[in-house]
Amino acid sequence: MTGSLLSIENLSIGFTGLNDQPIFIVRDVNLTLAAGETLGLVGESGCGKSSLLLAMMGYYKQGLGRLRGGIAYDGQDPGLVSSQQLQALRGGGMALIPQNAGQALTPTLRIKAQMVEVLRLHSDLAPGAWHARCLALFERVKLPDPEEMLERYPHELSGGQQQRVAIAMALAGEPDLLLLDEPTTGLDVTTQVGVLSLLQEICRDLNTAMVYVSHDIQVISQVCNQIAIMYAGEIVEMGPRADLLNQPVHPYTQGLLASIPRLDQQTLPHPIAGEMLQPVHRGSNVGCGYAGRCALATDQCREIAPLAQPIADRWVKCHEVTAARAGEFIRPAQKLLAPNLSDSELLAVEDLSVRYQAPTWLQSLRGQQPPAIVRAVSFGIRKGEIKGLVGESGSGKSTILKTIAGLQPSLSGRITLSGTDDLAGPVESRPRRCLRKVQLVFQNPDASLNPRKTTGEILRRPLELYFDLGPGVMDEEVDALLQRVNLPESYKGRFPGQLSGGEKQRVAIARALAAKPELILCDEITSALDVSVQAAILKLLLDLRADSGVSLLFVSHDLAVVETLCDSVLVLEGGEVREAGSCAEVFKNPQHAYTQALLASVL
Amino acid sequence: MLRLITRRLIFAVVTLWVVSIVVFSAIELLPGDACQAFLGQMAQGKRLENCRVEHDLNAPAYARYSKWAIGLASGDLGKSIKRSKPLEEIIGPRFRNTVILGLTAALVGIPLAIVLGALAALYRDRRADLWISFIAIFCMTVPEFIIGTLLISFFSVWLGWLPGIVIMRADAPLLDVLSKIVLPVMTLTLVMVAHIMRMVRTSMIDVLASDFVMMSQLKGVSRLRQVVMHALPNALLPTINLIALNIAWLMGGVLVVEVVFNYPGIGRLSVNAISDRDFPLVQAIALLMASLYVALNLIADLLALVLNPKLRTRGAKV
Amino acid sequence: MSSAPAMLKGVMATRSGKIGVVLVGFHLLLALMSPWLVPYDFAAQTALVDHAGPSLAHWAGLDTLGRDVLTRTMLGGREALLVTIFGTGLAVVWGSFFGVLAGYLGGRIDELIMRSVDIFLAIPWMIFLLLVIASFGNAPIVMILTLGFFYGIGVVRMARAATLEVVVKDYVLAAKARGESPLSIMMTEILPNVRDVLMVESAMRWSWMLLAFSALSFLGFGVTPPTPDWGLMIANSRIYLALAPWPVLMPMIALSSLIIGINLTADALAKSLGVDKTTRALV
Ligand SMILES: Nc1ncnc2c1ncn2[C@@H]1O[C@H](COP(=O)(O)OP(=O)(O)O)[C@@H](O)[C@H]1O
Ligand code: SF4
Ligand SMILES: [Mg+2]
């Protein structure tokens, strides 16, 4: 294939599992990229997109390797060239911009040393010119105060600055191809916007080709002209951006787009049933990798792997293209509005201030106070209300939740539940009755369940603690809880390690429900999940509220999720409330400059 | 950073002070006083009384402690019960010998352990690693006195290259000492290398799997530079303090090694002192060893501070 | 999750694990049964034929005093095993108690416990051991208590480090928020999750305590003659090594094989439990 900068043919990556069976992480991938072209690879976490990206540089993570297929960059296969050639290729021909720049910079070396390393290897500049070149690159990526930055260590930079350094470092070797692995994931939305516009600019000015990997199709569509959708190690659909976004063909692409919550939409995101299988469980599957979740799946799908079919400028791997194009099977549900909220206030937070550090004796001697993380925050939650709490990282969202839960002492202010129960004190001083009424669900599903307890044991514990139930009733109750979060009863005997991320989060929600709470505090409970799974959890939360009238305080950094789920919202910045009101008002007509900036950053 | 260093120094002094109390009271708590213990069967009547008067044992404990502590602070270690020489003269040269032994072993052992640990990590689960790890397990698990005995029978009995038992006066000139410590140093080094190498290996494996090492590789940096510039410094940082702690713990082994080789250091001296029930001597040695430990950890702290940019940032906490 | 048989199976899955289990099992069995198996009385001296090499009557020869080396080797690990098994148990119990406490409670209590640990580590433990034994005698209980105390100090550090990794997990926070008592959190949320690390580390510590015990008896502080003990046997016969290797080699092999066996088992256990990233530092 002449004219292509990068071409990949029938590439499979994986390892040899038990019984010498190959386990595929990436399977039969074909793609070509011309010079200056921008390709976005979209897929859920674990679908193999990072592995594919790294393979382009001839790199495989410990234990992985190429099982078959070919890669050609500029006619050379990075797996076959000499180590000198490979070293010249990496950083010189193509350069990686990693996901977490903070962890990708060597902590013990100054930024300058790490920049110069690339120049020494991949540029013809004389050593005397390195410094000037570094400064120029830093200006290119709009780092403030370049001279000063060069002298710093990585930990002395903010997340956004670290990412910009990583971009500058990638540009230093003047590569023809930039490989980006989720370069903005983990950054705050406002920072993300800045980095994305920088990337767009680089594309335009330098005419560098790009492969951009992300789980977020909206981010990809900002930068890339071509989009490839990956599922379970395979590219299932690939084509020009506009075609793919406006008329997705593959059932997974359709499902993915339908599951993304969006601002200003009156419909609920539509989940895809089930979850993607881990590579070891896909093992012997010979059919379509998506068959387990696909509404259109037939027997043929389960037995024969679909081949790529060209449709105009794109191609799709699916047996049922015609049915899929008819596109009848996804019916967006109307957004449920709160079932006539009563006026009675469940939780009242007045003038709450919190700080983590007590003053040291030196500070108290000088009459200084360490800064408060949360300052004079007041709000209320009505019975059955879902209240969103938004803000960037470090704005104090989790701190407020912990304080309400009694895990963090407050500096001043009042928290009252049902008008009578005082929640100002820590957990130890609260009566059982109060503890039961407020329950917590956490962000990271892997850390929120004790890996040594079965699901049954996990759900039984709050029942024992708060209620006086007989053993028979207890078992029934556990079954009922599992049923409420749409898990089969057989899950009682499973350990958390045997559950997927979404299932773990359901168990965590069931554990909260076991207490029959009046208020559930949710801390970013969907942000570690894939969008298609997130949509299902959001729906579950709405159903639970409709059934039991429980109130939720829902913390999230994702405005679209909050808009979808919540009745009212509180915007937090630097520990202070910037704006509060019903979702409809705040999102349609933001008053505060900070809210406006946040909304403008939503893609 | 200055505050950190001051904190460390203060803690070092406090440690030594508490240790001196613990050592003193431990000896107080033992059955009988120093004179009774030393004289044993003959501890009665005039003889006991004389001894007690001579060593000031009739004063109350706190008075004796403060006298001892003040003496220590001004470099006066006290008085042996058995020997008439002042303790400084007995301990001084032997302390020097032990420091020479330990220092040589550390100077040889630590770099060797770092290199071997890094190699084992680089060739993880391959032949080089298996061999290094296997030998390390052997050296860690076979007691020093067995290793020492084996080395003696191999190098001095069988090959006849090196003296097996060290025969020298405690205050022999430095060059004499150095020429005689090959086998004891070797014994000590083997054990030390084994332990430190394993720590370095574990830490290095962690670091090799980190994003920044992968990133350096994907920048096209050569393997050697990757290891030396990017991986090794970051692997060593968390191990510095651990290494110091473990060397200190391994100091217990110095006792045995000195006995095996008949080496005139404070280890062997302490065994003799205990056998003789010479408690003032034991007390002094115990405190000296504690100071050695404290000094070692202080050095490690400072080293970590110098090497770790995160600690050097203003206001950093440890 | 993993019961004792399951763990054994995990250990036996590797070759080195198998070797380790066989060695340790052999020594434990021998220690239990040897009084009934030995061919001679351990103190009986065969006159005039000291330093004799192996013969049909004395498979491993005789020592300096004309005593049967095989008999003494078979019996020579009993006291060491008794002391170190209970000593390690003691060390692990008190060490984990304070370590988990420090890690879980944090703050002032953590500071207090860890600073005390730092101070105790500064005490030259070997001298202290010798001193205690010299004053109170070498009865097993004295040895168990002192060894158990000093080896527990390292356990505190290790258990605290393991706990610190667990306490930050959200399930511990969830238990706190639920209103569980600190005791119940430590027992049901933390302990099961640090158990694997504790077990591997305890095995390692057992082998190190064996080293310490044998060093003590090498120095003449471990057991009282004529009780047979490997360390003491080596100390007594090592100067005649060139002349009569058996009285040294037999206890050497016995001691080393036991300690290597423990280490192989511990390594295999670590691998099968997935905790092979623990530092396994002495302290
Ligand atoms: N070194 C490895 N050994 C075995 N499996 C791995 C390894 N690295 C990643 N995997 C598995 O490969 C799959 C794809 O990983 P990755 O390429 O990182 O996906 P993505 O970037 O799309 O999240 C995941 O299921 C992951 O568990
Ligand atoms: S091939 Fe079948 S199962 Fe796979 S996506 Fe198409 S319709 Fe669904
Ligand atoms: Mg990835």
Image (spheres, rainbow, N blue to C red):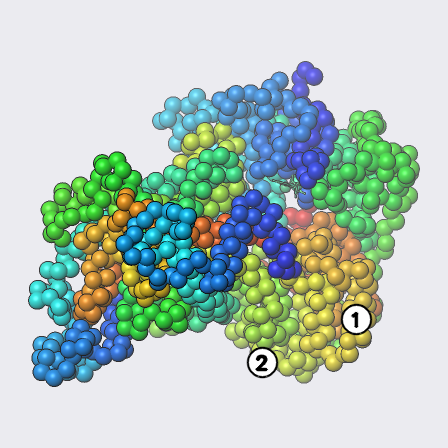
At x 64% / y 48%, what residue is drawn? Answer: A601
Q: Quadrant of ligand 1?
A: top right
Report the disc number at residue A475: 1
Residue denoted by label 2: A429
Mark 1 packing: few (<14 Cα in 10 Å), some, or many (20+)? Answer: some
Mark earlier in primary sequence (1, 2): 2
Residue B290 position within the rendered picture, expressed as x and y whole percent measured from the top left: 26, 62
Q: Is mark 2 within 8 Å of ligand 1?
A: no
Residue ID at (52%, 32%): B218
The residue nearer to you, when weighing C22 against A325, is C22
Task: State whether residue A220 is above or below residue A83.
Answer: below
Q: Looking at the picture, how far across and down is residue B192, in whole percent?
A: 34, 48
Quadrant assignment, res A482:
bottom right
Visible residue check, residue B64: no
Indicate the quadrant containing the N terminus of chain A: top left, top right, bottom left or bottom right.
top right
Q: Residue at x 55, y 20 (%)?
A: A81
Does B33 sit above or below residue A75?
A: below
